[in-house]
Image (tube, rainbow, N blue to C red):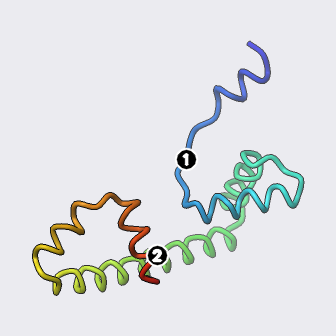
Amino acid sequence: MTVTKKIADSRRTIVVTLETGNKLKAFSKKNGLKLYEAIDSLVDVANENEDFSKAVIKLTKDRAKEKEVDREIFSQKVGKLPSALQAKLKSLSADDLAALLEKAGL
């Protein structure tokens, strides 16, 4: 098996937001790094450096709380809409709903 084949077989797809993906690409490109190697290194630093790890955990939990608050507010607002409009919103795909919210400035 070739080295290239080994590297390709050892990779896994992960899901990140477009914004995060763009940030990761920009970071790795700016520093002349391969994206997968930069991600490997970030994970290693998080596992080896307790302060860095704590900062990542705190930021992650803070963001999760913000999203939960946003979800609750959104849910309350949707609950006040007429039932026909609620049904229409539920029938939208995630992408269509995101585009609609973006267009509304939300």
Residue 74: x %, y % from top left: 30, 81
Left or right, 84 with reference to 50: left
- Residue at left offset 53%, top offset 72%: 60
Q: Of tags 2 and 1, which is closer to the observer?
A: 2
Amino acid type at circle 2 is Glu
Left or right, 73 with reference to 38: left
If you read the primary sequence from the N terminus, does the residue marked by circle 2 or circle 1 appear first?
1
Quadrant housing the N terminus = top right
Of the numbered discs in the image, which one, if any, rests on residue 102? 2
Q: Nearer the viewer, residue 12 or 70?
A: 70
Q: Which of 64 and 94 is in front in this view?
A: 94
Residue 6: x %, y % from top left: 71, 23
In the displayed image of the protein, which residue is found farthest to the right? Answer: 32
- Residue at left offset 30%, top offset 86%: 73
Mark 2 residue element: helix
In the displayed image of the protein, which residue is found farthest to the top? Answer: 1
The residue that disc 1 covers is 14
